[in-house]
Image: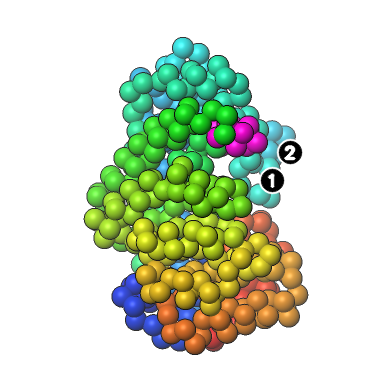
Amino acid sequence: MAQGRQAVYDLLEGKVSWPPVVVPFGLDPFGWHGERESYRKMCEFALEHCTLFPKVYPFNDPLAIGQGDIEIVSDVVEEIDGTIIQRYEIIGAKRVLSMEEVQTPGDSSWKNRKRWIENDDDFELFLGLHDITPAEPDIQAVRKKEQQVGGHGLPYIETPDPFYTACEMFPTDEFFIKIRTDTERIERLISITAERILYGIEKLCREAECPFILRLIGAEIAAPPFMSRENFLHFDGAFYMDVAEITRKHGVPASFHSHGPVRDIMNDVWEMGYSFMEPFEPLPNGNVTIEEAIEAAKGRGIVFGGVDDVVLNTGTPEKVRNAVKCCLDDARDTRAPYILSQSSTPFSDPLGETAKANYLLFLELGIKG
């Protein structure tokens, strides 16, 4: 199988050959990863042999709130040990609502330290905000990344999920309790959040004027085992169908992202019209083999994933070989579209020696089929 952008279009058209398309998920030789020495060999190998889906974040505004009478302001403080604290505030309301995130040295991810809604007064105040201006997507960031990627692949545009966004506004356990005890208000919160997110997606698809893949994130906290299939469809189904309709209208491939046991919702995702579903984690985190996932897709979309990133970060070479072999053996005889990838983007800095060797081994095995 050829690699690069054209290989993705071939898959989307149902043209399948072997070995599979191999995507080192989220790796960006043109951005964060390419700037770090510990990722240099992986980036060089990927640029020469693999298909690249580097991430782009055009919806960084918290809660998808834009500039208007109600808006969000932020400031950043760096502590002596290198810890970075980012504080966000909603201004224009009767009183300030705030949220804080922390980024620790060596970890590019952000962790919540304070949530937007910590009591019922906060909840009522937020629901009482009217005429909130939706955030504008950063279209230039998408165009820039698409130019950088070129024939190597396509930019992977991460889009928030309104259920996930609403969940992150509360302490997590409290949110799931409120789904049962305060359902009507939670549904209102999800609905008004969805309206703003859909505005951004529609505008991005309409005005980007360059190819990309829209990747929806956050479904795993609404899908099994967190909630039943029925509740997933109740709270999140309408949004996912609306996004699928928007992307189809503009000819944009859309990817449905959910970790964990996705067996119960696979058919729903393909019925909605998504082009990709990922990351299809192996047992024990997932509950579907690659062969089962491909058979369930029935050619309606492309199964994507299969290798647990924990194996790549900490496993032995033998475990890596076995993980890749299981995926390849499952997919080889189906003659159906498949993308071999790991379940999460590597973000440790520096990347450890074990992980470096394992990621390169994973890529080498994948492109050989």
Q: Residue at x 61, y 33 (%)?
A: 177
Judge the density around disc 1: few (<14), some (14-19), many (≥20) Cα neighbours within 10 Å: few
Q: Are marks 1 and 2 in contact (CB under 8 Å)?
A: yes
Q: Residue at x 42, y 18 (%)?
A: 128
Residue placed most toward the observer, 209 or 266? 266
| Left or right position of 86 against 69 | right
Q: Which residue is mark 2?
A: 81
Residue 153's tag is none
Q: Which segment is the magenta one?
A: 168-179
Rendering coords of residue 10 (x, y %): 34, 77
Q: Quadrant of residue 330?
A: bottom right
Q: Residue furthest front?
A: 230
Q: Which residue is mark 1?
A: 105
Q: Residue at x 61, y 65 (%)?
A: 287
**From what the image shows, is residue 161 above or below residue 311?**
above
Q: Secondary structure at mark 2?
A: loop
**From what the image shows, is residue 308 above or below residue 337?**
above
The three-letter code of the residue at mark 2 reads Asp
